[in-house]
Amino acid sequence: MRFYRPHSFYGLLLTGFFFVSLPLVAALVSSVRILDGLVQQSAVAVYSSVDRVSSSRRIAGLLQDQERKARLYNVLGEPAQLAEVNRMHGEIVEVLDHLAASVSDEDLLQLIGRLRAGESYLVAALNRTSSGPEELKREQEKILSRYRDIDRLAAAVERASNKLMIDQVDALKEKVSRDKETLIWQTSGLIGFSALLIAVFMVLISKPVRQIDKGIERLGDGDFKTPVEVFGPRDLEALGRKLDWLRQRLAKLDREKVKMVAHISHELKTPLASIKEGVGLLRDELVGPINRNQADVVAILDKNCGKLQKLIENILDFNMAQARKGTVEKKEVRLDELIDSVISDHRNSILARHIRLDVRLATTRINANPQQLRTVFDNLLSNAVKFTPEEGTIRIRMKTDGGVVHVRVEDSGPGIDDEDRSRIFSPFFQGKGAKNVVVKGSGLGLAITKEYVQNHGGEIRLLSSRKGACFAVSLPVSA
């Protein structure tokens, strides 16, 4: 069941282009989406990594400045130094909060929490004033010594930030690798699917074209029985219906031609018989004596009456061959003996022109009509003798291959022009080489030969040869 039948061949081409392009467009969209995701993730990773590293380094710098201000406050006791410590504490807390908000790693969050707690404790301890001056100074020195632990925590935070950046880079590399593999598989699959669609649409496009081409070839070969069927776009199907109408019309004209030629040929035989009988009476001087000049004229008339009779018989044979396809009476025939008999009929012409005959036959029996086979090989040998020059060579070869016997008749004449090869079996066709022979033919010999060979389920072909013409006849061998 055909689920889609475009209105025109152009529509089929556009449909094929659309469906073939879909997988490629899908591959392009998928590639853009994957690359866009990678770009966004890379941008986020780079931004967050740079932000964490800069925040951790800023914390370390602020802690160093805070420690310096705290020590100055411990030595000088100026409130301005303590105020700087408190200001820096606010900045440190703000940076730590910003860093904690951009981190999801638990270890790093714990380090940030410990660092915040330790730094807040130090600032709170520095702001206590309940003790005496000496005792306060000793407590402050003891508190300042804890900055070493705070610095170590700040360094640990920086190292953890760097490690987190490296882990993110590695994760990004792994994702790039996975996305690359996914992209390769997706692209390969979609390209393969696109190639499959191309193959499908090539079949859909070429099938009706091949059907039209085969239909035209059959019409050119004279096959008017096989219907021309075209399946595909509606405009090509319409063209196929027109070709089938042409086939029916040609078949009708061919039948009318056969009937007309048969009727004309039959009607010509009656007056020709009377003319031939009258010429015979004159030649035998039954109606009175004739002189030498009159005898020459009578001989010319008799010769041309024979040629005309042969032409009429060929036309009748050709029409009978077309009219009796598939109804040939057959019997078992020794093909090698039949060919020998045909050669004997042409022996005088062969000897008169000093033609060398090279014959190699094999004993072969086939089911065939003897009269039609005799006509086949008589026509082939007659043409070979006609076109072979004096002291030329005619070769006849026969061999069996499985259930088929192959007979090849080859001469050393001028051969057949390339432009004539396609029409050599057409009725009444005579190639350029026929103009150079003394005995003109009717152009029906090879057409009759082809019809008789096809009546036996065989095939006749014109083979390529370096010199002369080479005909090959293939016939099924009897069981």
Image: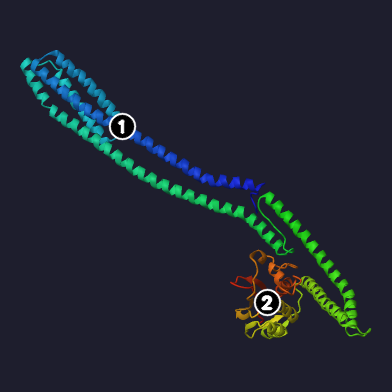
Vertical side of 140 occupied by 462: above or below: below
Q: Residue 398, position in %: x, y?
A: 62, 81
**Residue 441 is at least partly visible in this image:** yes
Across and down, in percent, residue 29 comes to 47, 40
Residue drawn at the location 75% of the way across and 71% of the way down:
444
- Quadrant assignment for the N terminus: bottom right
Q: Looking at the rendering, which quadrant does residue 44 occupy?
A: top left
Residue 384's disc number: 2
Residue positioned 11% across, 18% down in the render: 72
Residue 251 sits above or below residue 180 on the image:
below
Nearer the observer, 252 or 435: 435
Decide: few, some or many residues near mark 1? Use Cα within 10 Å; few <14, some 14-19, many ≥20: some
Q: Where is residue 429 in the image (x, y as percent from the top left)?
A: 73, 67
Q: In this view, does 7 lie above or below 220?
A: above
Q: Name the residue under label 1.
A: 48
Residue 333 seen by the camera = no
Amino acid type, label 1: Ser
